Amino acid sequence: MGLEKIIAIAGKPGLFKLIAQTRAGFIAESFLDNKRLSVSVQQNVSVLSEIAIYTLKEEVPLKQVFLNIKEKENGQPTSISQKDSKDKLEEYFFNILPDYDEDRVYVSDIKKVIQWYNLLQNHKLLDLLDADDTKKSDEEE
């Protein structure tokens, strides 16, 4: 399961795994409490593989940001919490993505990225990011 099967739902905490499609939307399972819920097509849903972070030059896919965090933290949970101060969060993110656009990337976005990374790390899904890279490089050859 890659990032294309993991979603964030507006108004709901955490991340969700796509389980099945229904006529009116789909069924998703929470990574926080493993509860399943029905998501209608009217709800605002973001697929993690489609999210990117603004930098001064381009948009960097969220997957690359997660890989940068994983490399910095040696695959462990982040050394800071999403509840840390604004300055601490911005300094940490600047170490992860030195040229991120401070005008368009808000502290709330940084908090989400850190929370999502830790959720993926807790569920041992970060290895899938590396597996996706390996699979794509094999296909290109």
Image (cartoon, rainbow, N blue to C red):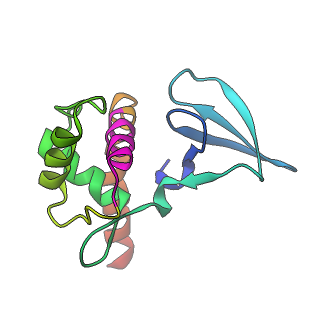
Q: Horizontally, is 107 left or right of 9 in the view?
A: left
Q: Which residue: 72% across, 31% down?
A: 37
Q: Horizontally, is 48 left or right of 78 in the view?
A: right
Image quadrant where one finds the C terminus: bottom left
Q: Work out whether residue 74 can be spotted.
A: no
Residue placed most toward the observer, 129 or 36: 36
- Return the x and y of residue 60 as percentages of the image width and height: 32, 67
- Hey, which quadrant is residue 124 in on the image? top left
Q: Horizontally, is 106 left or right of 94 in the view?
A: right
Q: Work out whether residue 126 can be spotted.
A: yes
- Return the x and y of residue 71 as percentages of the image width and height: 15, 48
Figure check: 37 above or below 134: above
Q: Which residue: 14% across, 62% down?
A: 98
- Return the x and y of residue 34 as percentages of the image width and height: 58, 23
Is 19 included in the stretch rendered in magenta? no
Q: Main secondary structure of the magenta part?
A: helix
- Return the x and y of residue 117 as percentages of the image width and height: 34, 40
Q: Which residue: 20% across, 38% down?
A: 75
Residue placed most toward the observer, 58 or 17: 58
Is 116 included in the stretch rendered in magenta? yes
Residue interval drawn in magenta: 105-118
